Image (cartoon, rainbow, N blue to C red):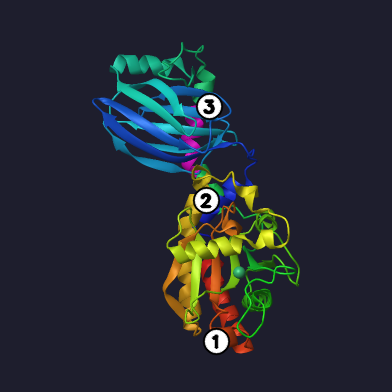
Amino acid sequence: MPRLPALLALLLLLLGAPLAAQTARILDLVLAAEGDAVIARLALSGPPEGGMRALALRDPDRLAIDIAGAAAVRREAAGAGGVRAARAGQFDPQTVRLVFDLARPMEIVAAHQPEPHTLEVRLRPVSAAAFAALARRGRVALAPGPGAAAPPPMPPSDRELAEVEALLAAEDRQRAEAAARQPRRAKPLVVIDAGHGGRDVGAISVHGRYEKDFTLAVARAAQRAIERRGGIEVRLTRADDRFLTLGERVRIAREAGADLFLSIHADSAPNALARGASVYTLSEVASDREAARLARRENRADMIAGADFSGQDSEVVPILLDLGKRDSMNASAGFAQLLQTHLAARGVGFRSEFHRFAGFQVLRNLGVPAVLLESGYLSNEEDSRLLFERRTQEAFAEGIADAVRAWLGR
Ligand SMILES: [Zn+2]
């Protein structure tokens, strides 16, 4: 099987889980000491649908909170005060478990949501005897609310507790086994997106040629080059001259279960001297004004066809750049570097700032590493000529294939 990086394996697991669209994702976990109390803050993609239950566990002493209707890939936080460390992870398909490793006996005094995207949990020291009593009590419902104290205990259930202990003990083993499990496909999948198409011609070169034709030629050549190397499955969002909305491109990649997404473009700029390739990754904040201008232009593709679909992902506010996506943004930066290295090795010229960030619609909502390659400038005489030469297109295809193979291969 291909040895995916651990992150990708986790993402695959998460993407494979039957998550409802509204499932709250745990985005971040931070601990802070406040006197002898400890405050744990969780950033959420939205309010969890289900309730929360807390329990105390012995040997070693831990406090745990089960958050129903939530999802998380494993997230760890450095300790603070009486808490040695904390972590959040998927406990079962519907539940995230938050675990606090205790340096001293503590109890959960309150859990509340100051706003829908934040959950605050307050822990304070208790006596060893009080902690032992908590552990005997089993799980208790934890009602979030402004300053809400822990409600009265539910009847203890030794069986339930024993099951939970067994599950906790098996947690790491299960994770290791899951990571080693055969992925859904025999081969990893890269989706290559030829930018523009059909009525949307993209940028027009100084020689009157269309960006959409360049992107398709490179996408098809890259597919051949990757398939020649073997071991990696390739799918194109379009294999002919047709119009696709940005949303459709994303959907194709998601439904295919892509492990990597690469969108191919060629830029155009008011400055006729501007030339060279750039690799872009998604960011809510553009790295510079020109990157922002480019994102606006590429995002406009949906409007060119007469219908404005560009608002369909507008609910993607920064907080919804959820865990999977944030981790995938880091991975995207890694692939961007790899792509630049392999393309440069094939003689592709890059701008000095080769890796830039902007809010590209086509890179949104993917949850897997995704980059947008601007191959050069159709507004530049030299670039415009080179980009439509077969030799140059093959160089792009081979460089892309090398990078994809290095990222996904074995
Ligand atoms: Zn384009």
Nearest to the eye among marks 3 and 2: give it: 2
Q: Amino acid at mark 2?
A: Lys
Judging by the rendered image, the residue that carries numbered circle 2 is: 325
Q: Main secondary structure of the magenta part?
A: helix
Q: Amino acid at mark 1?
A: Glu
Q: Secondary structure at mark 3?
A: helix
Residue 230 relative to residue 48: left or right: right
Nearest to the eye among marks 2 and 1: give it: 1
In the rendered structure, which disc, 3 or 1, sits on the residue that comes first in sequence? 3
Q: Position of residue 305 (x, y in %)?
A: 73, 62
Judging by the rendered image, the residue that carries numbered circle 3 is: 163
Residue 362: assigned label: none
253 above or below 99? below
Q: Position of residue 227 (x, y in %)?
A: 66, 75
* Range shown magenta: 164-173
Residue 70 relative to residue 212: left or right: left
Between the C-alphas of marks 2 and 1, the distance is 38 Å
